[in-house]
């Protein structure tokens, strides 16, 4: 079984490596999250906008 990824609590970026968010720089992370989405075109995605995502990447739908 793969090691569970951590998710930034601030912006919901899924951290593939390390424990510091590459998106917002926060180290406030959790491994308790639900859902996983890949956002490729954040400027065109209403889901990305609702999550306040501005960079492409992998995001959790819900944390905690
Ligand atoms: Zn973050």
Image (cartoon, rainbow, N blue to C red):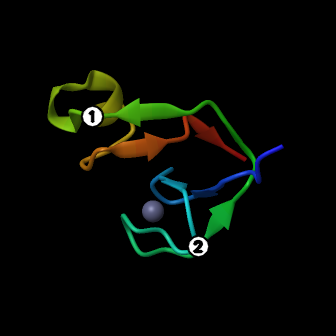
Measured as percent of width and height from the top left, residue 27 is found at 57, 76
Q: Is residue 36 above or below residue 23?
A: above
Question: Around disc 2, counting alpha carbons within 10 Å, would you say few (fewer than 14), some (14 to 19), or many (20 or more)?
Answer: few
In this figure, which residue is indicated by the disc labeled 1? 40
Q: Residue at x 48, y 42 (%)?
A: 59
The quarter in which the N terminus is drawn is top right
**Chain-order first, disc 2 or disc 1:** 2
Q: Residue at x 73, y 47 (%)?
A: 64
Label 1 residue near ligand 1, CB within 8 Å: no
State the image quarter where residue 22 is shown: bottom left
Q: Is residue 18 above or below residue 38?
A: below
- State ligand 1's quadrant: bottom left
Q: Residue at x 51, y 50 (%)?
A: 12
Is residue 48 left or right of 19 when viewed as pictured? left
Is residue 33 left or right of 8 when viewed as pictured? right
User: Mark 1 falls on what kind of element?
Assistant: loop
State the image quarter where residue 16 is shown: bottom right
Question: Around disc 1, counting alpha carbons within 10 Å, would you say few (fewer than 14), some (14 to 19), or many (20 or more)?
Answer: few
Residue 15 disc label = none
Q: Is residue 32 above or below residue 30?
A: above
Distance between the alpha carbons at the discs numbered 2 and 1: 22 Å
In this figure, which residue is indicated by the disc labeled 2? 18
Q: Residue at x 38, y 68 (%)?
A: 24
Camera-nearest residue between 16 and 7: 16
Is residue 23 left or right of 14 when viewed as pictured? left
Measured as percent of width and height from the top left, residue 57 is found at 37, 45
User: Mark 2 falls on what kind of element?
Assistant: loop
- Give the residue at the far left of this rendering: 43
């Amino acid at each position: 079984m793969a090691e569970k990824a951590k998710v930034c609590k601030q912006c919901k970026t899924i951290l593939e490596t390390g424990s510091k968010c590459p998106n917002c720089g926060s180290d406030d992370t959790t491994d308790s999250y639900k859902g996983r989405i890949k956002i490729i075109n954040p400027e065109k995605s209403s889901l990305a906008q609702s999550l306040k995502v501005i960079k492409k990447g992998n995001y959790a739908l819900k944390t905690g």
